[in-house]
Image: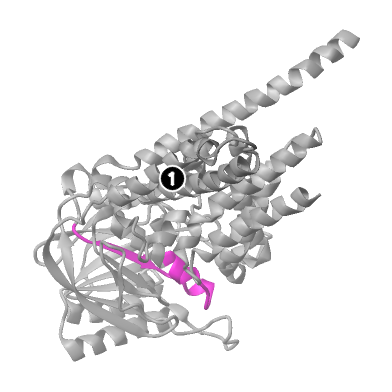
Amino acid sequence: MRAQLLAPALAALAGLAGLAAHPPMGWWPTTFLAPGLLVAALWLDANARAADGKRPRAARLGAVMGAVTFAPMLSWLILPADYIGWGLLVAVQVAWMALLAALLTPFLQGRWLPLVGAAIWTGIDAWRAIWPLGGFEWGAIAYAHVDGSWMIPVARLVGGRGITFLVVLISIAGAMVIRQTWVSVRERGDTSMEQALGATTWPIAWLVGGLVVSVLAVVDPPAEDGELDILAVQGNDRRHWEDPSPDPDPPLRITTAMRDETLAAIDRDGAPDLTVWPESSIDRDPYSDRGAELGELAGEAAGSAGTLVSGVTLDGPDPQANRYVAAIVLEDGFEETDRYVKRRLVPFGEYVPARPLLDWFPPLDQVPRDAIPGDGPQTIEVGDDDTPVAIIICFETKFQSLTRDNVLGGDEAGPTELLLTLTNDASFGDSAEPDQHLAQSQLRAIETGRHVVHAALTGSSAFVDPDGGVEQATELFTVDSIRAEVPLVKDLTPYLVIGDVIGWLTRAGVVAAGGLLLWAAIVRRRPDSLTIADDR
């Protein structure tokens, strides 16, 4: 009975450790506890259930961990999507964690558990990054390490999933060392302590090996080559969930605030090389009659700024039914010289899958038109020197391969020298979402070796360096601007050269582990089937 209660408690502690690693707490060392605690819960459950002649409840324990982590972590979704939308997204993440625990079960007693566990955990993250509905790899272990972890250089070598892989390997190996030491000492009898502890050789080897690799995998950021004087502006100061008064024209108010803050900053410090406005800064098509006034405001700002990159909503082929989420480059007034169209759209945020079946759901009234994805990779050029720049918009920060594609720029454009992330986090209120979102830009900066301008309509806007360091982070829901001489980078990190190798390999590992689990289930049922046939 004690094990039956302790196993879920340990799974819940694993979930709490994962939660505490991310904003608002941001205690990244707790990531080293979560995998080990989950495995300890699985060990306890497997032993107790085997003693009773029953099958392990691994999936339930994984679900407990997932619920404890993701239900509070994603609570910011309740404000825009109600409890139903939040609950559905949490349920998807819980299902993935349940599958993770189930796939770990056949390997719990093997000496290769740390390696296999790291591959399965990382592979589950890689799969939930692409499925369902495009994926949602929120809360991955690697994102917690962007603020000061010694593992940061690993991401420049093999991407953020390399950090996740090593953390899980080290955590599970540590749990194995503790468990094996306890068992060896308790059951050693007349055996010497040295001989008894010989059983810990493999776990210690995995632990030391993982730590050594994490320390030696040092890749410095690429050299800097030039710089741009960049002004980033945020212009939405309205706490919409607190203020019941009607907002007669939100797009006009926002673009006006963006224009005013831009002109004030230029009047104070002179014109920059590049001004950046976030997603939704021009939230009606400025080429249409109803958006022409917004275009005039943006043109006025660009006339003083010289070069302005702004998030914009553009009408699609059927303006009543579809649109584009984009960024445009304006030069010396409202003269568009380049454009980026968002490639990975947010289901139920920017388009509604199976819309005819779901129109009854009230929160979807906020998505009256479906966005159309752009082709990729896409880059833009800014300034007198036509500096190549990569852009990602909103939750595209979650997709490391997309960011890599845009930074590499395709065969013709060549590598870009700067990364802009434009987002509108206004829907999520005063929550941890902006900091969790900023952590994604930090990891993309580390992977690509590029400086990142993270421009958020309501904050937190910031400049991010290739070590993940954050400068001039703004407060939420303030009209504000930040400015810095931002270095440019032309050379490539190893990750940009080789891509997400760990993601592809571990996805294959998850498929293999799933096949093994399915085969084991078929084998278990085969004797029962034969018995039934004989009885007939």
Local packing at callout 1 (Cα closer than 10 Å; few below 14, some 14-19, many 20+) is many
Q: Is residue 269 left or right of residue 471?
A: left
Name the residue type under label 1: Leu
Above or below residue 394? Residue 165 is above
Q: Is residue 392 magenta?
A: no
Closer to us: 199 or 274? 199
Res 406 seen here: yes
For residue 102, above or below residue 92: above
* Residue 431 drawn in magenta: yes
The residue closer to the viewer here, 470 or 456, is 470
Q: Residue furthest right?
A: 536
**Which residue corresponds to the image point at 29% horizontal and 59% vertical from the top-left?**
445
Residue to which mark 1 is pinned: 207
Q: Is residue 97 visible?
A: no
**Image position, residue 154 (x, y; %):** 32, 50
**Highlighted magenta segment, given as a residue range:** 417-437
**Residue at 30 percent of width and 79 percent of height:** 472
Residue 2 at x, y percent in the picture = 78, 51
- Looking at the rendered image, the quarter that the C terminus falls into is top right
Q: What is the quadrant of residue 332 in the picture?
A: bottom left
Kindly state the secondary structure of the residue where label 1 is placed: helix
Task: Please say if 107 is above or below 291.
Answer: above
Q: Is residue 39 left or right of residue 299?
A: right
Q: Quadrant of residue 505?
A: top left
Q: Residue 517: percent from the left, percent from the top?
A: 62, 29
Question: Residue at left 39%, top 50%?
Answer: 163
Q: Is 161 situated left or right of 78 in this image? A: left
Residue 30 in the image: x percent, y percent? 50, 61
Q: How is the image coloured?
A: one colour
